Amino acid sequence: MMRFEFGNILPLAALTLATSLSLAGCSSMQEAVAASPTVSSVWGVGEMPLEDINALYTNEESQWMSINGMQVHYRDEGNPDGQPIVLIHGILSSLHTWDKWNEGLADDYRIISLDVPGFGLTGGQKNPDDFSEDLLHSSFEQFITQLQLDDFVLVGNSLGGYISAHYAASNPDKVEKLILIDPAGAPQELPFILSLASMPGINSLAANVFPPFIVAMGVKDVYGDPDRITKENMNRYIHLSLRPGAKQAYANTIAMLDEKNSKNKPLNFASITAPTLLMWGEKDIWVPATLSEQWLSNIPGSTLITYPNAGHVPMEEIPQQTLNDALAFLNLK
């Protein structure tokens, strides 16, 4: 059982106060209560049993691959004889964010999606101190190597966009085409919720206490139009945040992003040779569309499509429109 000492009360109070001020009414708390299985999980202390999480979010296509001491959850579906396309989700998300795209790709493409280490159904490392940006990159490298993929299409959103760009720059002979959707990686200030969670006292607390109403707030932040959020999607984000080990992984990733941004290093992906399409929601408040200029200037020959009424996850928010644009790009000779 977790024991709170007095020194932890102030950071928790600050976190609760700051997030409460950002709530639009009580809707985020209501959604957290509705999706959370226990009172303790409502307040971000309890967890959902792993078997319950897996029962909800695996399917007949789910597989597991041992990488860097972790069991990486992935799916290999669609047309087994089609062009391989690899899909990488963003921070606090999972491979399920691509479900609507999968429906439109299944006839012609071999679709491979994975839960990035620490997220979805993929656990983190046993020693949380081993988590790093290098771990994310090396894990993806090993994932591609074990699948023996060559000449594939690579698509990444948010943190997954950064991982994708890094891989494409390091392995230009393997990536045929690259799609980056609201990619993270350019120097920027963290969005409010992540900035708050990156503060030293609060970050260490968040590794043990990460209330689902903060997750619900985050989901509303990443949609340009919160009315497009389905109950199914909101419940999934909340449930996966209650996965054993998820709080520590979330806290580690937020701290990593904060450290990276503090170094203010410019993008370094000029070695990418694959034709590259940038897709960006103009209402993205997590990774603003103005950052697309840095990506366009850094990746030779890259092009940009923006979506006026979408936010940080346009492939989830407006799946058909973004899929149509992606297919048009992929069909270009």
Image (tube, grey):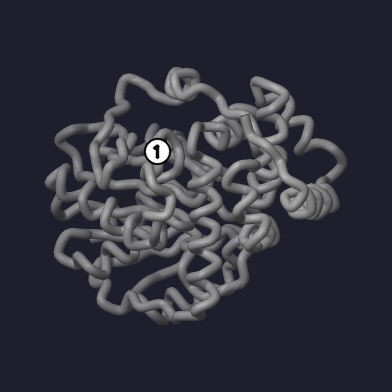
Q: Along the line of sight, which residue is nearer the eye, 1 or 326?
A: 1
Residue 87 relative to residue 265: left or right: left
Count of numbered marks: 1
Question: In the rendered image, is residue 116 in sight?
Answer: no
Query: Which corner quadrant holds the C terminus?
Result: bottom left
Task: Identify the residue at horizontal 45%, vertical 37% (top origin).
Answer: 120
Would you name the residue on which mark 1 appears? 123
Task: Identify the residue at horizontal 32%, vertical 66% (top origin).
Answer: 166
Residue 318 relative to residue 271: left or right: right
Answer above or below: position of 262 versus 31. Answer: below
User: Where residue 261 appears, x then y in whole percent?
Assistant: 53, 72
Dot 1: within a 10 Å radius of its alpha carbon, few (fewer than 14), some, or many (20 or more) residues? many
Task: Identify the residue at horizontal 57%, vertical 68% (top origin).
Answer: 289
Residue 181 relative to residue 317: left or right: left
Q: Along the line of sight, which residue is nearer the eye, 318 or 132?
A: 132
Label 1: element kind: loop
Q: Residue type at mark 1?
A: Gly
Task: Identify the residue at horizontal 67%, vertical 59% (top origin).
Answer: 201
User: Where residue 55 appears, x then y in whole percent?
Assistant: 44, 18
User: Where residue 132 appears, x then y in whole percent?
Assistant: 39, 59
Query: Which corner quadrant holds the N terminus?
Result: top right
User: Where residue 21 appears, x then y in whole percent?
Assistant: 85, 52
Answer above or below: position of 249 versus 286. Answer: above
Question: In the rendered image, is residue 27 in sight?
Answer: yes
